[in-house]
Amino acid sequence: MNHFAHRNLVRRLVATLISCLLLWGPTPMVAPRTHEAGLQTGSAFHPWSPPTGQGMTTGKPPAAVLHVPEAFATIQAAVNAARPYDLISIAPGIYHEAVIVRTAHLTIRGRDRNRVILDGNFELGDGFAVIANYVVLENMTVRHYLGNAFYWEDVQGFRGSYLTAYANGDYGVYAYNSNTGQFDHDLAAGQPDSGFYIGGCHPCNAIISQVIAEDNAIGYSGTNAGGNLLIRDSIWRENMVGILPNSHDFEPHPPEDDTTIMNNLAENNNNLNAPAKAFIYFAFGNGIMDLGGKRQSYPEQPRQRAPLLWDCARTKPIHTLLGARRQ
């Protein structure tokens, strides 16, 4: 069993244990809904045309451009051949592969967000698993994987921009035990855990901005995350729960601490038709739920009714943050 399969197995076993403790008796599981990349429901995001010759470092062209499939038949073959500061350019098509990135300072970019598609056929583990520093993933769609769509683990420096993740088996856009990064202009839909996740980091030195999360169990989950972590200018709608910073002692760096949430729209997060794991049902109906964290910041913004635990099922605020300590 490889490293990623072992990590996912452990997380699933822990999730099952929590489910048994929180919920006695059977809990209905809802099948994922399909979100075709070209039908981004209500989304303001459109296919993106990348600027010619732009590399990872601002103002610096890539060392080399590796074209898939013109020069390399698969994305993995191009990744294996790449050297730091190269750009991998992917033509429109459907790619049935699980890509592991071990080379630092790469940019992997689709040429058409809606037509560059990695499809796991509900058989492969993760779409992208990145275990190297400063890797950028841009402008593509990942769907139908058993695990995660876009996944960075144990890295410093990550970015996911103009990505679409839908109907995967775990998380959408996911950074674990990693720091110094950003997710922007992404869409995550139909994941049975969270659409977006940054967790197990302190300080995270990370930002999530201008994203949409819809029809997930959780829009954003951040277990034991914080420290210069900013979630802003995004839409969290039609999930089971919208934004869920939280703490657990089975993950590194507990507790969740010092996250800023500002200028977001969280609405209609009471969707029982969203796919969900059993242990998430207790959070149903909340737009923003702070579970066991401390030192959160909720600057007043026109689109943000914080600092409150906002119950979208009953459309009224609850003046308690569950298990949270404000310091």
Image: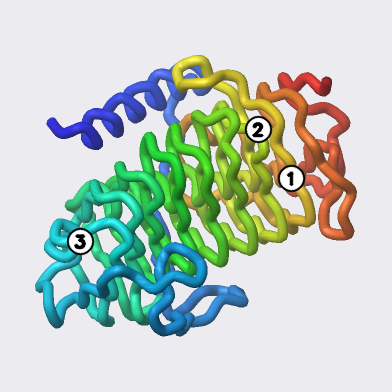
Residue at point 39%, 61% (across, down): 137
**Few, some or many residues within 10 Å of mark 2 (<14, 14–19, 20+):** some
- Give the spatial CA distance, label 3 vs label 2: 33 Å
- The residue carrying mark 1 is 261
Image location (x, y in percent) of residue 86: 29, 65
Find numbered disc 2 in the image and state the secondary structure of the residue it sits on.
loop
Image location (x, y in percent) of residue 153: 36, 38
Image location (x, y in percent) of residue 21: 48, 16
Find numbered disc 1 in the image and state the secondary structure of the residue it sits on.
strand
Q: Which amino acid does label 3 sit on?
A: Ala
Tags 3 and 2 in contact by the CB under 8 Å rule? no
Closest to the observer, 78 or 272 = 78
In screen coordinates, is 250 left or right of 126? right
Quadrant in which residue 175 is drawn: top left
Q: Which amino acid does label 2 sit on?
A: Gly
**Few, some or many residues within 10 Å of mark 1 (<14, 14–19, 20+):** many
Closest to the observer, 228 or 239 = 228
- The residue carrying mark 2 is 227
Residue at point 59%, 45% (across, down): 206
Residue at point 51%, 64% (across, down): 187
Label located before the other in sequence (3 or 1)? 3
Does residue 279 lie above or below 189 as drawn?
Answer: above
- The residue carrying mark 3 is 82
Whether residue 306 can be seen here: yes
- Give the spatial CA distance, label 1 vs label 2: 12 Å
Does residue 170 lie above or below 98 as drawn?
Answer: above
Label located before the other in sequence (1 or 2)? 2
Q: What residue type is labelled 1?
A: Ile
